[in-house]
Amino acid sequence: MNTRAARFLNPYLGGVLLGLVLFGSYALTGGGIGASGAINRCQISAVKAVLPGHVDRVKYLAETGGGSRSPLADASVWMLLGTFVGGLISGAAQGRFKVELFKGPRISGRRRLILAFAGGAIMGYGARLARGCTSGQALSGGATLSVGSFAFMFSIFGAGYAVAYFLRRQWI
């Protein structure tokens, strides 16, 4: 057994480090952390590469990447890239870099992937509707004591528990 792969960061130390990253984000960029805004910018950039006129005609898209503005010219895009690369480096350094599919005994791999992608799509839509993903709303909004962010967090946890009740038989 590889004991190196079983090591995880102490959760209290991880919380302190995450708080320092959040503080650094506010200090360096003037904004918090989150992924949905950066993913949105990447999507707008892809649309602009294929249909630049469409981006200029749709107000929501034009505000981020219309005209000569690059949707990728934002600190959040670099933060998203850094999160991805940092996760790869951390996984490789701790011996946990591998492709695997977690699922219960009563669900097929195909169905697990379909449910995961459907859940991700619903969460992505909800993140744009709420003007922030769970990390942006919970961490950045919570750090600023935003009432809307706390309402979002409670809604996410409540919905997660409600859906888990119905899907739990897939895992046992």
Image (cartoon, rainbow, N blue to C red):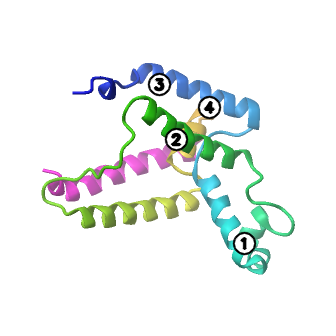
Per the model, the C-alpha gap separating discs 1 and 4 is 32 Å
Q: Residue at x 55, y 37 (%)?
A: 86
Q: Amino acid at mark 4?
A: Leu
Q: Looking at the picture, which amino acid does disc 1 mark?
A: Ala
Q: Marks 4/3: CA distance?
A: 12 Å
* Circle nearer the viewer, 1 or 4: 1
Amino acid residing under circle 3:
Gly
CA separation, marks 4 and 2?
Answer: 11 Å
Say which label, 1 or 4, has the lower sequence index. 4
- The relative height of residue 10 versus residue 88 in the rendered view (above or below) is above
Q: Secondary structure at mark 1?
A: helix
Q: What residue did someone put label 4 on?
A: 22
Residue that appears at 43% across and 20% down: 12
Looking at the picture, does residue 137 appear above or below residue 66?
A: above
Q: Which residue is mark 1?
A: 49
Numbered disc in front, either 4 or 2: 4
How many marks the image carries: the answer is 4
Point out the stretch of residues depicted in magenta.
Answer: 146-172
Marks 1 and 2: which is nearer the front? Answer: 1
Spatial CA distance of label 3 from label 1 is 39 Å
Question: For residue 39: magenta?
Answer: no
Q: Nearer the viewer, mark 3 or mark 2?
A: 3
